[in-house]
Amino acid sequence: MKKIINEPGNVVPEMVDGLVRAYPQYLRQIPETMAVIRSNEDSMAGKVGIVSGGGSGHEPSHAGFVGPGMLSGAVCGQVFTSPTPDQIYEAIKAADHGKGVFLVFKNYSGDAMNFDMAKDLADVDDIEVKSIVVDDDIAVEDSLYTQGKRGVAGTVFMHKILGAAADQGASLDELEELAQAVLPNIKTIGIALHAATVPEVGKPGFELADDEIEYGVGIHSEPGYKREKIKASKDMAEELVGQLDKSLGLDSSKKYAVMVNGMGATPLMEQYIFSHDLLDLLNAKEISPAFMKVGNYMTSIDMAGLSLTIFELKEDKWLDYLNYKVDTIGW
Amino acid sequence: MALTVDNLTEWINAFAQKVTDKKDYLSELDTPIGDGDHGNNMARGVKAVQESLDAKAPADLTAAFKQIAMALISKVGGASGPLYGTAFLEMAKKSKDSTEIADLFAAADAGIKKRGGAQAGDKTMVDVWEPLAAKLASGSLTQAEIDEAVNSTEEMIAKKGRASYLGERSSGHLDPGAMSSGYLFTALIETEGIL
Protein backbone atom coordinates (compact mmCIF):
# COMPACT_ATOMS: atom_id res chain seq x y z
CA MET A 1 0.00 0.00 0.00
CA LYS A 2 1.35 3.39 -1.04
CA LYS A 3 -0.64 6.32 0.33
CA ILE A 4 0.04 9.86 1.52
CA ILE A 5 -1.01 9.28 5.12
CA ASN A 6 0.40 9.17 8.64
CA GLU A 7 -1.19 6.53 10.88
CA PRO A 8 -3.91 4.53 9.05
CA GLY A 9 -6.11 4.93 12.15
CA ASN A 10 -5.89 8.74 11.96
CA VAL A 11 -7.00 9.09 8.36
CA VAL A 12 -10.45 10.54 9.08
CA PRO A 13 -9.63 13.10 11.80
CA GLU A 14 -6.61 14.35 9.87
CA MET A 15 -8.61 14.57 6.65
CA VAL A 16 -11.44 16.51 8.32
CA ASP A 17 -8.98 18.83 10.02
CA GLY A 18 -7.20 19.52 6.74
CA LEU A 19 -10.46 20.13 4.95
CA VAL A 20 -11.90 22.65 7.42
CA ARG A 21 -8.58 24.48 7.81
CA ALA A 22 -8.12 24.70 4.05
CA TYR A 23 -11.67 25.89 3.45
CA PRO A 24 -12.79 27.92 6.49
CA GLN A 25 -14.99 30.03 4.21
CA TYR A 26 -17.19 26.96 3.57
CA LEU A 27 -16.96 24.74 6.63
CA ARG A 28 -16.38 24.59 10.30
CA GLN A 29 -15.99 21.45 12.38
CA ILE A 30 -18.51 20.82 15.15
CA PRO A 31 -16.33 20.48 18.29
CA GLU A 32 -15.61 16.92 19.47
CA THR A 33 -17.08 15.39 16.31
CA MET A 34 -16.21 14.40 12.77
CA ALA A 35 -19.16 16.47 11.55
CA VAL A 36 -18.94 19.74 9.64
CA ILE A 37 -21.44 22.57 9.29
CA ARG A 38 -21.71 25.53 6.92
CA SER A 39 -19.61 28.52 8.00
CA ASN A 40 -22.18 30.87 6.53
CA GLU A 41 -24.73 30.87 9.36
CA ASP A 42 -26.87 33.59 7.74
CA SER A 43 -27.50 31.38 4.70
CA MET A 44 -29.26 28.83 6.95
CA ALA A 45 -31.51 31.26 8.85
CA GLY A 46 -35.20 30.46 8.58
CA LYS A 47 -34.62 27.43 6.35
CA VAL A 48 -34.84 23.67 6.75
CA GLY A 49 -31.39 22.20 7.30
CA ILE A 50 -30.13 19.44 4.98
CA VAL A 51 -27.70 16.97 6.54
CA SER A 52 -25.98 14.11 4.78
CA GLY A 53 -23.09 11.82 5.53
CA GLY A 54 -21.88 8.28 5.68
CA GLY A 55 -18.57 6.50 5.72
CA SER A 56 -15.49 8.44 4.59
CA GLY A 57 -13.59 7.57 1.43
CA HIS A 58 -16.11 9.12 -0.99
CA GLU A 59 -14.67 12.63 -1.11
CA PRO A 60 -15.72 15.24 -2.08
CA SER A 61 -18.90 13.56 -0.72
CA HIS A 62 -20.31 14.57 1.55
CA ALA A 63 -18.54 17.48 3.24
CA GLY A 64 -17.56 18.96 -0.13
CA PHE A 65 -21.22 19.68 -0.84
CA VAL A 66 -21.77 21.76 2.29
CA GLY A 67 -22.48 25.36 1.42
CA PRO A 68 -25.25 27.83 0.52
CA GLY A 69 -27.71 26.18 -1.89
CA MET A 70 -26.72 22.62 -1.01
CA LEU A 71 -26.01 20.82 2.31
CA SER A 72 -26.10 22.49 5.72
CA GLY A 73 -23.91 19.87 7.32
CA ALA A 74 -22.20 16.54 6.73
CA VAL A 75 -21.08 13.75 9.03
CA CYS A 76 -17.88 11.84 8.28
CA GLY A 77 -17.78 8.25 9.54
CA GLN A 78 -14.70 6.06 9.63
CA VAL A 79 -13.58 4.85 6.19
CA PHE A 80 -16.50 2.95 4.59
CA THR A 81 -18.22 2.86 8.02
CA SER A 82 -21.36 4.68 9.08
CA PRO A 83 -20.97 7.59 11.47
CA THR A 84 -22.46 7.07 14.95
CA PRO A 85 -25.85 8.54 15.96
CA ASP A 86 -24.39 11.00 18.49
CA GLN A 87 -22.28 12.58 15.73
CA ILE A 88 -25.22 12.74 13.31
CA TYR A 89 -27.30 14.21 16.09
CA GLU A 90 -24.75 16.99 16.68
CA ALA A 91 -24.96 17.87 12.98
CA ILE A 92 -28.77 17.87 13.19
CA LYS A 93 -28.66 20.28 16.14
CA ALA A 94 -26.24 22.59 14.33
CA ALA A 95 -28.30 22.50 11.12
CA ASP A 96 -31.62 23.15 12.83
CA HIS A 97 -32.76 26.76 12.52
CA GLY A 98 -36.27 26.25 13.78
CA LYS A 99 -37.68 24.67 10.61
CA GLY A 100 -36.47 21.13 11.12
CA VAL A 101 -33.81 19.05 9.42
CA PHE A 102 -33.92 16.74 6.42
CA LEU A 103 -31.49 13.81 6.33
CA VAL A 104 -30.12 12.27 3.13
CA PHE A 105 -28.36 8.92 3.46
CA LYS A 106 -27.62 5.90 1.33
CA ASN A 107 -29.23 2.49 1.60
CA TYR A 108 -26.77 0.55 3.75
CA SER A 109 -27.93 -1.20 6.91
CA GLY A 110 -25.33 0.61 9.06
CA ASP A 111 -26.28 4.06 7.78
CA ALA A 112 -29.99 3.30 8.09
CA MET A 113 -29.70 2.24 11.73
CA ASN A 114 -27.42 5.07 12.77
CA PHE A 115 -29.32 7.85 10.97
CA ASP A 116 -32.67 6.52 12.25
CA MET A 117 -31.31 6.45 15.76
CA ALA A 118 -30.08 10.04 15.41
CA LYS A 119 -33.62 10.91 14.34
CA ASP A 120 -34.92 9.38 17.59
CA LEU A 121 -32.44 11.39 19.62
CA ALA A 122 -33.57 14.59 17.88
CA ASP A 123 -37.16 13.57 18.56
CA VAL A 124 -36.48 13.57 22.30
CA ASP A 125 -35.31 17.19 21.91
CA ASP A 126 -38.30 18.16 19.75
CA ILE A 127 -36.33 18.83 16.58
CA GLU A 128 -38.46 17.71 13.65
CA VAL A 129 -36.50 15.42 11.32
CA LYS A 130 -37.44 13.69 8.09
CA SER A 131 -35.28 11.69 5.71
CA ILE A 132 -34.78 10.02 2.36
CA VAL A 133 -32.80 6.83 1.76
CA VAL A 134 -31.13 6.87 -1.66
CA ASP A 135 -30.89 3.53 -3.52
CA ASP A 136 -30.00 4.51 -7.09
CA ASP A 137 -27.59 1.66 -8.02
CA ILE A 138 -29.35 -0.69 -10.43
CA ALA A 139 -26.45 -3.19 -10.68
CA VAL A 140 -27.67 -5.73 -8.12
CA GLU A 141 -30.80 -6.11 -6.02
CA ASP A 142 -29.04 -7.10 -2.80
CA SER A 143 -25.41 -6.63 -1.90
CA LEU A 144 -22.94 -6.59 0.94
CA TYR A 145 -23.90 -4.24 3.79
CA THR A 146 -27.35 -3.58 2.38
CA GLN A 147 -30.73 -5.20 2.04
CA GLY A 148 -32.04 -3.80 -1.21
CA LYS A 149 -30.30 -1.65 -3.79
CA ARG A 150 -27.21 0.39 -2.90
CA GLY A 151 -27.00 4.17 -2.73
CA VAL A 152 -24.20 5.61 -4.88
CA ALA A 153 -23.39 8.70 -6.98
CA GLY A 154 -27.02 9.62 -7.68
CA THR A 155 -27.10 10.77 -4.04
CA VAL A 156 -25.25 13.91 -5.17
CA PHE A 157 -28.16 14.86 -7.45
CA MET A 158 -30.46 14.37 -4.44
CA HIS A 159 -28.27 16.74 -2.39
CA LYS A 160 -28.40 19.33 -5.15
CA ILE A 161 -32.17 19.18 -5.66
CA LEU A 162 -33.05 19.28 -1.96
CA GLY A 163 -30.43 21.92 -1.19
CA ALA A 164 -31.81 24.24 -3.85
CA ALA A 165 -35.41 23.69 -2.74
CA ALA A 166 -34.54 24.26 0.92
CA ASP A 167 -32.65 27.43 0.05
CA GLN A 168 -35.79 28.72 -1.69
CA GLY A 169 -37.81 28.13 1.46
CA ALA A 170 -39.35 24.67 1.00
CA SER A 171 -40.83 23.25 4.21
CA LEU A 172 -39.83 19.92 5.72
CA ASP A 173 -42.99 18.29 4.36
CA GLU A 174 -42.41 19.76 0.90
CA LEU A 175 -38.84 18.48 0.90
CA GLU A 176 -40.02 15.01 1.84
CA GLU A 177 -42.54 15.02 -0.99
CA LEU A 178 -39.92 16.31 -3.44
CA ALA A 179 -37.34 13.71 -2.38
CA GLN A 180 -39.81 10.87 -2.79
CA ALA A 181 -40.89 12.15 -6.21
CA VAL A 182 -37.29 12.49 -7.42
CA LEU A 183 -35.84 9.24 -6.02
CA PRO A 184 -37.27 6.66 -8.46
CA ASN A 185 -36.01 8.72 -11.41
CA ILE A 186 -32.32 8.60 -10.49
CA LYS A 187 -30.47 5.48 -11.67
CA THR A 188 -26.77 4.67 -11.56
CA ILE A 189 -24.44 1.90 -12.65
CA GLY A 190 -20.68 1.60 -12.24
CA ILE A 191 -17.61 -0.10 -13.63
CA ALA A 192 -14.32 -0.91 -11.89
CA LEU A 193 -10.83 -1.39 -13.29
CA HIS A 194 -9.14 -1.75 -9.91
CA ALA A 195 -10.50 -2.01 -6.34
CA ALA A 196 -10.09 0.50 -3.52
CA THR A 197 -7.62 -0.02 -0.67
CA VAL A 198 -8.98 0.90 2.78
CA PRO A 199 -5.99 2.35 4.70
CA GLU A 200 -6.52 0.20 7.78
CA VAL A 201 -6.83 -2.95 5.65
CA GLY A 202 -3.83 -2.25 3.45
CA LYS A 203 -4.81 -4.27 0.39
CA PRO A 204 -7.42 -3.87 -2.37
CA GLY A 205 -11.00 -4.94 -1.56
CA PHE A 206 -10.93 -7.45 -4.43
CA GLU A 207 -8.53 -8.56 -7.12
CA LEU A 208 -8.93 -7.85 -10.82
CA ALA A 209 -6.34 -9.06 -13.31
CA ASP A 210 -4.50 -6.39 -15.31
CA ASP A 211 -6.75 -6.95 -18.30
CA GLU A 212 -10.07 -7.37 -16.43
CA ILE A 213 -12.93 -5.05 -15.60
CA GLU A 214 -16.01 -5.61 -13.47
CA TYR A 215 -19.43 -4.14 -14.18
CA GLY A 216 -21.76 -3.08 -11.39
CA VAL A 217 -19.22 -2.77 -8.56
CA GLY A 218 -20.40 -0.71 -5.57
CA ILE A 219 -18.58 2.19 -3.93
CA HIS A 220 -17.24 -0.05 -1.13
CA SER A 221 -15.80 -2.73 -3.44
CA GLU A 222 -19.01 -4.75 -3.28
CA PRO A 223 -19.21 -7.28 -6.13
CA GLY A 224 -20.86 -6.35 -9.41
CA TYR A 225 -22.77 -8.44 -11.94
CA LYS A 226 -20.13 -9.53 -14.45
CA ARG A 227 -16.42 -9.58 -15.11
CA GLU A 228 -14.88 -9.26 -18.57
CA LYS A 229 -11.66 -8.55 -20.41
CA ILE A 230 -10.97 -4.82 -20.73
CA LYS A 231 -12.76 -3.17 -23.63
CA ALA A 232 -12.78 0.16 -25.45
CA SER A 233 -14.46 3.12 -23.76
CA LYS A 234 -17.29 3.04 -26.32
CA ASP A 235 -18.05 -0.59 -25.49
CA MET A 236 -18.16 0.20 -21.76
CA ALA A 237 -20.46 3.15 -22.49
CA GLU A 238 -22.71 0.86 -24.51
CA GLU A 239 -22.98 -1.66 -21.65
CA LEU A 240 -23.76 0.99 -19.01
CA VAL A 241 -26.23 2.90 -21.18
CA GLY A 242 -27.88 -0.41 -22.11
CA GLN A 243 -28.43 -1.28 -18.44
CA LEU A 244 -29.79 2.19 -17.63
CA ASP A 245 -32.01 2.07 -20.71
CA LYS A 246 -33.56 -1.18 -19.45
CA SER A 247 -34.29 0.48 -16.13
CA LEU A 248 -35.40 3.95 -17.27
CA GLY A 249 -36.70 3.34 -20.81
CA LEU A 250 -34.66 6.14 -22.43
CA ASP A 251 -36.85 8.17 -24.74
CA SER A 252 -36.10 11.21 -26.92
CA SER A 253 -39.29 12.91 -25.75
CA LYS A 254 -38.03 13.03 -22.16
CA LYS A 255 -35.46 15.26 -20.46
CA TYR A 256 -32.44 13.88 -18.63
CA ALA A 257 -29.62 15.00 -16.34
CA VAL A 258 -26.45 12.94 -16.60
CA MET A 259 -23.49 12.46 -14.27
CA VAL A 260 -20.24 10.75 -15.21
CA ASN A 261 -18.56 10.17 -11.86
CA GLY A 262 -14.92 9.20 -11.40
CA MET A 263 -14.23 6.62 -8.67
CA GLY A 264 -11.02 8.23 -7.46
CA ALA A 265 -8.15 6.86 -9.55
CA THR A 266 -9.55 7.42 -13.02
CA PRO A 267 -8.21 10.60 -14.67
CA LEU A 268 -10.58 13.26 -15.96
CA MET A 269 -9.09 12.62 -19.39
CA GLU A 270 -10.65 9.15 -19.39
CA GLN A 271 -13.90 10.47 -17.96
CA TYR A 272 -14.15 12.97 -20.83
CA ILE A 273 -13.39 10.22 -23.37
CA PHE A 274 -16.15 8.12 -21.83
CA SER A 275 -18.44 11.18 -21.98
CA HIS A 276 -17.68 11.53 -25.69
CA ASP A 277 -18.76 7.92 -26.28
CA LEU A 278 -21.74 8.28 -23.97
CA LEU A 279 -23.01 11.40 -25.72
CA ASP A 280 -22.59 9.73 -29.13
CA LEU A 281 -24.77 6.87 -27.90
CA LEU A 282 -27.40 9.18 -26.43
CA ASN A 283 -27.40 11.40 -29.52
CA ALA A 284 -27.99 8.30 -31.64
CA LYS A 285 -31.17 7.88 -29.59
CA GLU A 286 -31.91 11.57 -30.25
CA ILE A 287 -31.30 12.42 -26.61
CA SER A 288 -29.16 15.35 -25.59
CA PRO A 289 -28.91 15.78 -21.82
CA ALA A 290 -30.53 18.90 -20.38
CA PHE A 291 -27.85 18.93 -17.68
CA MET A 292 -24.52 17.16 -17.34
CA LYS A 293 -21.67 16.86 -14.84
CA VAL A 294 -18.36 15.05 -15.35
CA GLY A 295 -15.86 14.63 -12.52
CA ASN A 296 -15.19 13.10 -9.12
CA TYR A 297 -18.28 13.48 -6.95
CA MET A 298 -18.79 10.15 -5.14
CA THR A 299 -15.43 8.41 -5.13
CA SER A 300 -14.34 5.10 -3.66
CA ILE A 301 -10.90 6.04 -2.27
CA ASP A 302 -8.48 4.93 -4.99
CA MET A 303 -10.74 2.68 -7.01
CA ALA A 304 -10.22 3.03 -10.75
CA GLY A 305 -13.42 3.19 -12.73
CA LEU A 306 -16.47 5.35 -13.04
CA SER A 307 -20.21 5.38 -12.66
CA LEU A 308 -22.91 6.71 -14.92
CA THR A 309 -26.03 8.29 -13.45
CA ILE A 310 -29.07 9.18 -15.53
CA PHE A 311 -31.82 11.19 -13.89
CA GLU A 312 -35.09 11.61 -15.70
CA LEU A 313 -36.27 15.18 -15.20
CA LYS A 314 -39.99 14.61 -14.93
CA GLU A 315 -40.57 18.21 -13.88
CA ASP A 316 -39.00 21.40 -15.26
CA LYS A 317 -38.58 22.61 -11.71
CA TRP A 318 -36.03 19.84 -11.10
CA LEU A 319 -33.82 21.24 -13.85
CA ASP A 320 -34.06 24.68 -12.23
CA TYR A 321 -32.91 23.13 -8.96
CA LEU A 322 -29.91 21.54 -10.69
CA ASN A 323 -28.99 24.88 -12.24
CA TYR A 324 -29.62 26.83 -9.01
CA LYS A 325 -26.55 28.68 -7.78
CA VAL A 326 -24.47 27.03 -5.07
CA ASP A 327 -21.25 27.83 -3.30
CA THR A 328 -19.46 24.63 -2.23
CA ILE A 329 -16.07 22.99 -2.55
CA GLY A 330 -17.23 20.03 -4.59
CA TRP A 331 -20.19 20.78 -6.90
CA MET B 1 -36.68 -5.72 45.28
CA ALA B 2 -36.41 -2.74 43.05
CA LEU B 3 -34.14 -1.17 40.54
CA THR B 4 -32.16 1.80 41.82
CA VAL B 5 -29.37 3.91 40.37
CA ASP B 6 -26.98 2.05 42.68
CA ASN B 7 -27.87 -1.50 41.74
CA LEU B 8 -28.25 -0.52 38.07
CA THR B 9 -24.67 0.77 38.20
CA GLU B 10 -23.57 -2.45 39.90
CA TRP B 11 -25.33 -4.52 37.23
CA ILE B 12 -23.80 -2.57 34.37
CA ASN B 13 -20.34 -2.73 35.92
CA ALA B 14 -20.70 -6.51 36.21
CA PHE B 15 -21.75 -6.65 32.53
CA ALA B 16 -18.75 -4.49 31.60
CA GLN B 17 -16.45 -6.86 33.50
CA LYS B 18 -17.82 -9.92 31.68
CA VAL B 19 -17.51 -8.26 28.26
CA THR B 20 -13.97 -7.15 29.03
CA ASP B 21 -12.98 -10.64 30.25
CA LYS B 22 -14.55 -12.29 27.20
CA LYS B 23 -13.47 -9.69 24.64
CA ASP B 24 -11.33 -12.10 22.62
CA TYR B 25 -13.94 -14.85 22.77
CA LEU B 26 -16.65 -12.48 21.42
CA SER B 27 -14.43 -11.40 18.55
CA GLU B 28 -13.60 -15.05 17.85
CA LEU B 29 -17.32 -15.85 17.61
CA ASP B 30 -17.68 -12.92 15.21
CA THR B 31 -14.86 -14.06 12.93
CA PRO B 32 -16.48 -16.88 10.94
CA ILE B 33 -19.86 -15.16 10.53
CA GLY B 34 -19.12 -11.42 10.84
CA ASP B 35 -16.15 -9.11 10.67
CA GLY B 36 -14.39 -10.26 13.81
CA ASP B 37 -14.70 -7.11 15.89
CA HIS B 38 -17.68 -7.65 18.22
CA GLY B 39 -15.52 -8.18 21.33
CA ASN B 40 -13.33 -5.15 20.67
CA ASN B 41 -16.31 -2.94 19.86
CA MET B 42 -18.29 -4.00 22.92
CA ALA B 43 -15.25 -3.73 25.22
CA ARG B 44 -14.68 -0.17 23.99
CA GLY B 45 -18.36 0.58 24.58
CA VAL B 46 -18.63 -0.77 28.12
CA LYS B 47 -15.42 1.05 29.07
CA ALA B 48 -17.03 4.30 27.88
CA VAL B 49 -20.14 3.45 29.92
CA GLN B 50 -18.08 2.95 33.07
CA GLU B 51 -16.15 6.17 32.47
CA SER B 52 -19.39 8.06 31.94
CA LEU B 53 -21.00 6.72 35.13
CA ASP B 54 -17.81 7.40 37.11
CA ALA B 55 -17.47 10.93 35.78
CA LYS B 56 -21.06 11.92 36.44
CA ALA B 57 -23.31 10.05 38.88
CA PRO B 58 -26.77 10.03 37.30
CA ALA B 59 -29.54 11.79 39.20
CA ASP B 60 -32.17 9.14 38.51
CA LEU B 61 -32.82 5.94 36.57
CA THR B 62 -33.85 7.76 33.41
CA ALA B 63 -30.64 9.77 33.40
CA ALA B 64 -28.63 6.61 34.11
CA PHE B 65 -30.16 4.66 31.23
CA LYS B 66 -29.67 7.61 28.91
CA GLN B 67 -26.03 7.98 29.90
CA ILE B 68 -25.46 4.25 29.29
CA ALA B 69 -27.22 4.50 25.91
CA MET B 70 -25.23 7.51 24.74
CA ALA B 71 -21.89 5.97 25.74
CA LEU B 72 -22.70 2.76 23.84
CA ILE B 73 -24.05 4.65 20.82
CA SER B 74 -20.97 6.84 20.53
CA LYS B 75 -18.34 4.17 21.12
CA VAL B 76 -19.48 0.74 19.89
CA GLY B 77 -20.21 1.51 16.23
CA GLY B 78 -21.36 -0.97 13.59
CA ALA B 79 -24.80 -2.45 14.16
CA SER B 80 -24.25 -3.38 17.82
CA GLY B 81 -23.87 0.26 18.88
CA PRO B 82 -27.29 1.39 17.67
CA LEU B 83 -28.92 -1.87 18.82
CA TYR B 84 -27.58 -1.86 22.40
CA GLY B 85 -27.97 1.93 22.45
CA THR B 86 -31.62 1.58 21.45
CA ALA B 87 -32.21 -1.02 24.17
CA PHE B 88 -31.01 1.35 26.88
CA LEU B 89 -32.62 4.42 25.30
CA GLU B 90 -35.98 2.61 25.30
CA MET B 91 -35.42 1.71 28.97
CA ALA B 92 -34.70 5.40 29.62
CA LYS B 93 -38.01 6.38 28.03
CA LYS B 94 -39.94 3.61 29.78
CA SER B 95 -38.39 4.43 33.16
CA LYS B 96 -40.32 7.70 33.22
CA ASP B 97 -43.50 5.75 33.95
CA SER B 98 -42.33 2.36 35.22
CA THR B 99 -39.25 1.01 36.95
CA GLU B 100 -40.47 -2.60 36.81
CA ILE B 101 -37.67 -4.65 35.30
CA ALA B 102 -40.17 -6.62 33.16
CA ASP B 103 -41.59 -3.41 31.66
CA LEU B 104 -38.13 -2.03 30.95
CA PHE B 105 -36.99 -5.20 29.19
CA ALA B 106 -40.20 -5.45 27.18
CA ALA B 107 -39.61 -1.88 25.91
CA ALA B 108 -35.97 -2.64 25.13
CA ASP B 109 -36.85 -5.86 23.27
CA ALA B 110 -39.43 -4.02 21.15
CA GLY B 111 -36.91 -1.26 20.42
CA ILE B 112 -34.21 -3.70 19.27
CA LYS B 113 -36.64 -5.42 16.91
CA LYS B 114 -37.81 -2.12 15.47
CA ARG B 115 -34.28 -0.80 15.00
CA GLY B 116 -32.80 -3.88 13.39
CA GLY B 117 -35.90 -5.38 11.81
CA ALA B 118 -35.01 -8.83 13.18
CA GLN B 119 -37.44 -11.35 14.62
CA ALA B 120 -36.92 -14.39 16.82
CA GLY B 121 -35.23 -17.16 14.80
CA ASP B 122 -33.12 -14.79 12.67
CA LYS B 123 -29.94 -15.67 14.64
CA THR B 124 -29.47 -12.32 16.35
CA MET B 125 -29.52 -10.84 19.84
CA VAL B 126 -33.33 -10.89 19.57
CA ASP B 127 -33.14 -14.66 20.15
CA VAL B 128 -31.91 -13.88 23.64
CA TRP B 129 -33.84 -10.68 24.39
CA GLU B 130 -37.29 -11.90 23.37
CA PRO B 131 -37.47 -15.17 25.37
CA LEU B 132 -35.65 -13.75 28.38
CA ALA B 133 -37.75 -10.57 28.50
CA ALA B 134 -40.74 -12.95 28.57
CA LYS B 135 -39.18 -14.91 31.48
CA LEU B 136 -38.65 -11.66 33.39
CA ALA B 137 -42.29 -10.80 32.80
CA SER B 138 -43.25 -14.16 34.31
CA GLY B 139 -41.21 -13.31 37.39
CA SER B 140 -38.07 -15.44 37.28
CA LEU B 141 -34.93 -16.00 35.26
CA THR B 142 -32.23 -18.64 35.68
CA GLN B 143 -28.75 -19.10 34.22
CA ALA B 144 -29.91 -22.32 32.53
CA GLU B 145 -32.58 -20.35 30.69
CA ILE B 146 -30.02 -17.76 29.61
CA ASP B 147 -27.69 -20.50 28.33
CA GLU B 148 -30.53 -22.15 26.47
CA ALA B 149 -31.45 -18.91 24.71
CA VAL B 150 -27.85 -18.13 23.72
CA ASN B 151 -27.20 -21.70 22.54
CA SER B 152 -30.40 -21.74 20.48
CA THR B 153 -28.67 -19.44 17.97
CA GLU B 154 -25.99 -22.03 17.15
CA GLU B 155 -28.00 -24.08 14.68
CA MET B 156 -29.97 -21.17 13.25
CA ILE B 157 -29.40 -19.79 9.75
CA ALA B 158 -28.81 -16.05 9.90
CA LYS B 159 -31.43 -13.87 8.24
CA LYS B 160 -30.24 -10.46 9.41
CA GLY B 161 -26.91 -8.70 9.64
CA ARG B 162 -23.64 -9.49 7.97
CA ALA B 163 -23.91 -13.23 8.84
CA SER B 164 -26.95 -13.48 6.56
CA TYR B 165 -24.69 -13.20 3.49
CA LEU B 166 -23.35 -16.64 4.41
CA GLY B 167 -26.78 -18.22 4.21
CA GLU B 168 -26.66 -21.85 5.39
CA ARG B 169 -22.97 -21.62 6.17
CA SER B 170 -23.88 -19.40 9.15
CA SER B 171 -25.31 -22.47 10.92
CA GLY B 172 -23.05 -24.16 13.47
CA HIS B 173 -21.82 -20.90 15.00
CA LEU B 174 -23.12 -19.08 18.08
CA ASP B 175 -24.28 -15.55 17.34
CA PRO B 176 -21.84 -13.11 19.01
CA GLY B 177 -24.57 -10.54 19.74
CA ALA B 178 -26.62 -13.25 21.44
CA MET B 179 -23.59 -14.19 23.53
CA SER B 180 -22.86 -10.63 24.67
CA SER B 181 -26.57 -10.18 25.43
CA GLY B 182 -26.38 -13.35 27.52
CA TYR B 183 -23.70 -11.66 29.66
CA LEU B 184 -26.04 -8.72 30.27
CA PHE B 185 -28.75 -11.07 31.58
CA THR B 186 -26.28 -13.09 33.66
CA ALA B 187 -24.99 -9.86 35.23
CA LEU B 188 -28.60 -8.91 35.94
CA ILE B 189 -29.46 -12.10 37.86
CA GLU B 190 -26.14 -12.00 39.72
CA THR B 191 -26.71 -8.45 40.98
CA GLU B 192 -28.41 -8.60 44.34
CA GLY B 193 -31.52 -6.63 45.03
CA ILE B 194 -32.83 -6.17 41.48
CA LEU B 195 -34.95 -9.28 40.85
Image (spheres, coloured by chain):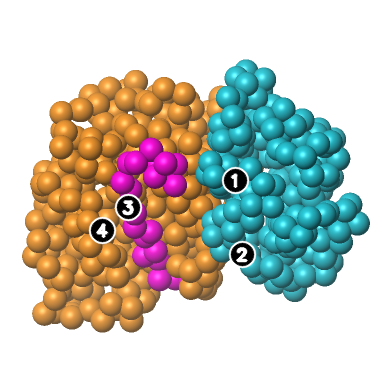
Rendered view: A86 above or below B115: above
Rendered location of residue B182, percent (x, y): 79, 50
Q: Which residue is under mark 1?
A: B98
Using a 10 Å C-alpha cutoff, classify the residue at mark 4 as few (fewer than 14 neighbours), some (14 to 19) or many (20 or more). Answer: some
Q: CA distance from mark 1 to mark 3?
A: 30 Å
Q: Which residue is under mark 4?
A: A176
* Shown colour of chain B: cyan
Instruction: Look at label 1 and name its amino acid.
Output: Ser
User: Going by the image, does A312 lie left or right of A150?
Assistant: left
Dot 1: what SS? loop
Q: Is residue B60 shown in magenta?
A: no
Circles 4 and 3 on the same subunit: yes
Q: CA distance from mark 4 to mark 1?
A: 36 Å
Among the 4 quarters of the image, the one containing residue A68: top left
Instruction: Look at label 2 and name its amino acid.
Output: Ala
4 and 3 marks in contact (CB < 8 Å): yes
Q: Which residue is under mark 3?
A: A130
* Shown colour of chain A: orange
Q: Which residue is under mark 2?
A: B118
Q: Which residues are magenta?
A: A120-140
Among the 4 quarters of the image, the one containing residue B8: top right
Rendered location of residue B143, percent (x, y): 89, 52
